[in-house]
Image (spheres, grey):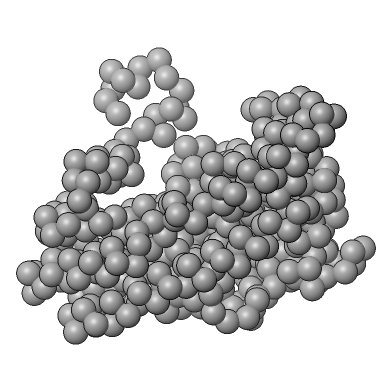
């Protein structure tokens, strides 16, 4: 954003400006409708639950009293029956009994997607210049959200099991030495099938993260923001307890902020997410939310509650997992066939929507690098890894990229992977 454009605007407007690479990717896709997009993190258009949603709408519409309630304002914290359903699902997923160490109903806040929850938390916790330690790489949309509130993002090294505890400890020690420990307000992790890396944080690592956050909370609480957007999209392996559940066993649930959503597992158009908050944060977050919207769209909440009550959500997720499992298998099989011989490796994802590639060191995958234009000319689009790294801390490697298999068909995935291999092969 130029100086003339910034004149008269708030600092936050300036922080939000700049070159939006998502817009650039969309421009490429629109200019080349023949492109196979392995970039967009959207859900599969063909698996969207049209019939299940119609049936839920019919059921909601059949009761005039409930219809009028749905068409009225709701509460800032969210529709009670939806919050009860979310709580019930959370307790069952984490094998927690009601009244034990799990969350309570008044800790659950419904939002317009999990991104709104993340934004509200950032706005509530962070002053300009304060720090969030993030996995390197991290979800780039939240990195932009943090930049928009003037926060600093500091990357911490990861491996195939998530953030490396020793690296997190070392980063916190560096901040203490620099006199910045009091500025560290949170640690951000996507614990299930990370966007972009595909990693799932192991149970042992989750326990270590909580212990580290507690140990370094000298001058203020260092919260852990657990982004669980992809938890339902598990294709292989066993369920892993949430950070929130483990925190409840260790510290009465006061260290972890849990963000969830139905956008990836049911419908992004309905736009319903939620947060499970430490008790001390519920009031401040609701105050921020009340200033924004008085409560997320009530009709959407009652619709989603009806979907859950009818059992439609679980039936949909069962089919969705099978569809995405085939796509993940196709992506990995294609990578093994065409990319492995080129010296490329990847994180062995078991769920989610993403595969994270590491190319030979000499290949620059960035928007201005040699591979991006070559890949577009070959008919395939990807997300450059450089977009996914915090501004400070662990250095951004130039040879990473993210693939998303959510949107394209199996046939297009195979075609796109072969095209990507051709593009990389021309640079060898």
- 402 or 225, which is in the foreground? 402
- Residue at 20% x, 75% y: name it: 360
Q: Can you give x and y, in whole percent of width and height, for residue 54 in the image?
A: 63, 43
Residue 55 relative to residue 403: left or right? right
- 273 or 58, which is in the foreground? 58
Give residue 348's quadrant in the image: bottom left
> Quadrant of the image for the N terminus?
top left
- Residue at 28% x, 82% y: name it: 336
- 289 or 89, which is in the foreground? 89
Give residue 246's quadrant in the image: bottom right
Residue that sits furthest to the top in the current view:
8
> Quadrant of the image for the C terminus?
bottom left
Q: Can you give x and y, in whole percent of width and height, for residue 173 in the image?
A: 54, 67
Q: In the image, is residue 149 above or below residue 424?
A: above
Q: In the image, is residue 287 above or below residue 24?
A: above
Residue 225 relative to residue 38: left or right? right
- Residue at 33% x, 44% y: name it: 22
Residue 333 relative to residue 193: left or right? left
Q: In the image, is residue 208 above or below residue 100?
A: below
Q: In the image, is residue 13 above or below residue 309?
A: above
Q: Can you give x and y, in whole percent of width and height, for residue 342 in the image?
A: 17, 80
- Residue at 32% x, 55% y: name it: 39
* Count of all numbered marks drawn on residues in the image: 0
One can see residue 180 in this view: no
One can see residue 382 in this view: yes
Residue that sits furthest to the right in the current view:
99
Q: Can you give x and y, in whole percent of width and height, for residue 288 in the image?
A: 68, 32
């Amino acid at each position: 954003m130029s100086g003339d454009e910034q004149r008269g605007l708030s600092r936050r407007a300036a922080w939000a400006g700049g070159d939006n690479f998502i817009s650039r990717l969309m421009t490429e896709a629109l200019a080349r409708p023949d492109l196979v997009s392995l970039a967009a993190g959207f859900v599969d258009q063909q698996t969207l639950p049209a019939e299940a949603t119609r049936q839920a709408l019919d059921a909601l519409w059949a009761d005039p009293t409930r219809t009028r309630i749905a068409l009225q304002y709701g509460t800032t914290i969210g529709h009670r029956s939806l919050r009860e359903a979310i709580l019930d699902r959370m307790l069952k997923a984490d094998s927690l009994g009601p009244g034990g160490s799990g969350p309570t109903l008044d800790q659950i806040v419904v939002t317009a997607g999990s991104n709104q929850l993340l934004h509200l938390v950032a706005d509530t916790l962070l002053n300009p210049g304060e720090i969030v330690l993030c996995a390197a790489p991290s979800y780039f949309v939240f990195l932009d959200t943090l930049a928009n509130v003037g926060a600093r993002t500091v990357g911490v090294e990861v491996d195939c099991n998530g953030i490396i505890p020793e690296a997190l400890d070392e980063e916190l020690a560096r901040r203490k030495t620099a006199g910045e420990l009091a500025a560290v307000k949170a640690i951000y992790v996507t614990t299930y099938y990370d966007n972009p890396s595909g990693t799932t944080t192991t149970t042992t690592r989750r326990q270590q993260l909580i212990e580290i956050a507690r140990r370094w909370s000298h001058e203020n609480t260092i919260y852990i923001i657990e982004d669980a957007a992809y938890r339902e999209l598990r294709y292989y392996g066993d369920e892993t307890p949430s950070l929130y559940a483990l925190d409840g066993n260790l510290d009465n649930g006061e260290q972890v902020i849990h963000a969830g959503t139905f956008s990836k597992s049911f419908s992004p158009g309905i736009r319903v997410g939620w947060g499970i908050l430490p008790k001390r944060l519920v009031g401040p977050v609701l105050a921020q939310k009340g200033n924004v919207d008085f409560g997320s769209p009530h009709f959407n909440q009652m619709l989603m509650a009806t979907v859950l009550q009818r059992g439609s959500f679980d039936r949909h997720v069962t089919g969705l997992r099978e569809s995405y499992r085939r796509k993940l298998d196709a992506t990995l099989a294609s990578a093994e066939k065409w990319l492995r011989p080129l010296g490329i490796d990847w994180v062995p994802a078991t769920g989610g929507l993403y595969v994270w590639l590491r190319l030979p060191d000499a290949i620059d995958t960035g928007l201005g690098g040699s591979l991006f234009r070559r890949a577009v000319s070959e008919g395939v689009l990807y997300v450059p890894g450089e977009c996914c790294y915090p501004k400070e801390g662990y250095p951004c490697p130039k040879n990473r990229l993210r693939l998303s298999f959510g949107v394209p068909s199996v046939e297009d995935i195979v075609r796109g992977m072969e095209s990507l291999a051709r593009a990389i092969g021309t640079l060898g």
